[in-house]
Image (cartoon, rainbow, N blue to C red):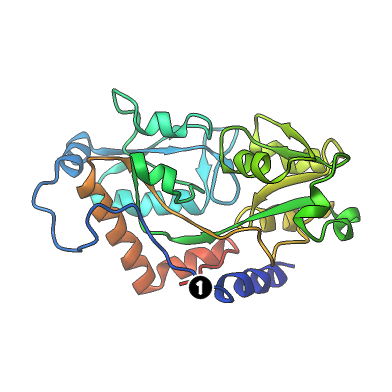
Amino acid sequence: MRKIFLLFLTAVLFGSTVSFASCTANEDSAVVVNQPTITRIQERGTALIGTTGDYRPLSFREADGRYWGFGIEMAQEIAKRLGVGIEFVQTSWPTLSADVQAEPQTFDLAIGGITITDARCETMLMSEGYLANGKTILCRASEANRYKSLADIDKPEVRVMVNPGGLNEKFANKNLTHATIIVHPKNEEIPSLVAEGKADVMITEITEAPYYVQTDARLAAPLLNTPFNHGEIGVLMRKGQDDLLQLVNDVIRQMKSDGSLCQLHEKYGLVYGY
């Protein structure tokens, strides 16, 4: 099953032109002379990393407080480059932007399934993309043939469940004007609720859907190979941290160059398209 989904994702990501961008103030890889953010983090000895912890397999927080996932390992690589330890700070999709820009500062950067958008770039900084993404659905495997297009979902009898405050909710509100939209506070609970019949469809991403299909035979992602849109995932931080942004971009570029990013994608069953 994992190989099937890898083929689907490969077809999606390599069959289209994917150009990984960023909200970078300075695309030049030259050394930044002033490094106030990096200096502050190194003097503290710990990088504070904001993450939602509800987005398998990119960022998930277990009951014992342990974080794991693709984004978590990316954060660890960034902390390693800084030469410091790491502390994860839980945030949420509804409060993500406010937490990034909070005074006093809540964390140094945020990571884990955060899509690069024009709206975020207007008020914050985002790194280069390190993972291609796109909207798709989860539904019950027994009803997989029922959904072949967005029009099949946008019907009053279809109950669509989304988590609050993020791009999934925005996508549903914009594109599903006839379906019944249910907002559930915990993203990680929605797949099971769909499987149990509490909702019919979950709006999710091509990075998240394969995990749940592989781990729960009751679920299917029938439109995985034809996502509704295309995007890129990056690292989010407040404006004015150009030195940290450059370091993060350098880490991403190095991981692309040496193959370690490819290995990380393979570890979590993900494919990147650059």
Residue situated in front as seen by the camera: 70 or 168: 168
At 42% from the left and 53% from the top, the residue drawn is 234
Q: Nearer the viewer, residue 74 or 154?
A: 154
Three-letter residue code for mark 1: Thr
Does residue 81 appear anywhere in the picture?
Answer: no
Closer to the camera in the image, 242 or 173? 173
Q: Percent from the top left, x then y, of residue 225?
A: 69, 67
Q: Is residue 68 above or below residue 260?
A: above
Picture quarter with the N terminus:
bottom right
Q: How many marks?
A: 1
**Residue most toward the right?**
142
Q: Is residue 129 left or right of residue 183?
A: left
Give the residue drawn at x 44%, y 53%.
73
Q: State the residue lying farthest toward the left.
A: 33
According to the picture, the residue beneath numbered tag 1 turns out to be 17
| Quadrant placement of the C terminus | bottom left
The answer to which quarter of the image holds residue 12 is: bottom right
Comparing 125 with 54, the one in front is 125
Looking at the image, the residue that sits furthest to the top is 104
At numbered mark 1, what does the secondary structure look like: helix, strand or loop?
Answer: loop
Where in the figure is residue 195, as x and y percent of width and height? Answer: 83, 44
Observer able to see residue 270 = yes
Q: Residue at the location (35% across, 73% down)?
A: 258
